[in-house]
Image: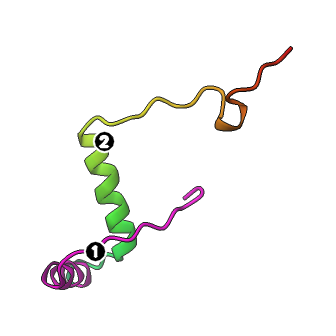
């Protein structure tokens, strides 16, 4: 995974317990499963933001 970023999510205790039990029963690790679910959701929604062609650090500068 290139340049991972930490994201924290707050969910009700009952949902957290349910998710942990699911991961334990199915043999999943929580972090990779959450990452996969987010990726699959974004893919399913067809969300692909346009890439920045010039890079953020070059905005507002002109080459002479």
Q: Which residues are magenta?
A: 1-24
- Give the answer, above or below, for where 28 lies relative to 47: below
Q: Based on the displayed image, in which of its 4 quarters is residue 43 positioned?
A: top left
x then y, percent, for residue 26: 23, 77
- Which numbered mark, 2 or 1, is in the foreground of this view? 1
Disc 1 marks which residue?
Answer: 10
Residue 47 percent location from the top left of the image: 32, 37
Residue depicted at x 64% and y 36%? 56
Residue 52 in which image quadrant: top right
Q: Dot 2, crowdedness within 10 Å: few (<14), some or many (≥20)?
A: few
Give percent across and percent down for residue 61.
Answer: 75, 25
Which residue ends up furthest to the front in the rendered image? 60
CA neighbours of label 1 inside 10 A, class few (<14), some (14 to 19), many (20+): few
Query: Residue at image x 39%, y 67%?
Result: 32
Magenta stretch: includes residue 9: yes
Seen from the viewer's position, the closer of residues 26 and 44 is 44
Q: Element type at marker 2?
A: helix
User: Foreground: 37 or 49?
Assistant: 49
Image disc number at residue 43:
2
Up-down relation of residue 36 to residue 61 (above or below): below
Q: Is residue 48 left or right of residue 63?
A: left
Label ID, residue 56? none
Tell me if residue 22 is in the magenta stretch. yes
Instruction: Give the mark nearest the N terminus, 2 or 1.
Output: 1
Apparent side of residue 58 relative to residue 44 in the rendered image (left or right): right
Image quarter in which the N terminus is found: bottom right
Residue at 20 percent across and 77 percent down: it is 19
Q: Does 47 appear above or below 12?
A: above
Whole-number angstrom distance, CA of label 2 to CA of label 1 = 23 Å
Q: Are marks 2 and 1 in contact (CB under 8 Å)?
A: no
């Amino acid at each position: 995974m290139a340049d991972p970023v930490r994201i924290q999510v707050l969910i009700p205790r009952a949902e957290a317990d349910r998710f942990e039990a699911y991961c334990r029963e199915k043999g999943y690790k929580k972090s990779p499963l959450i990452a996969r679910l987010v990726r699959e959701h974004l893919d399913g929604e067809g969300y692909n933001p346009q890439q920045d062609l010039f890079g953020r650090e070059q905005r507002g500068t002109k080459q002479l």
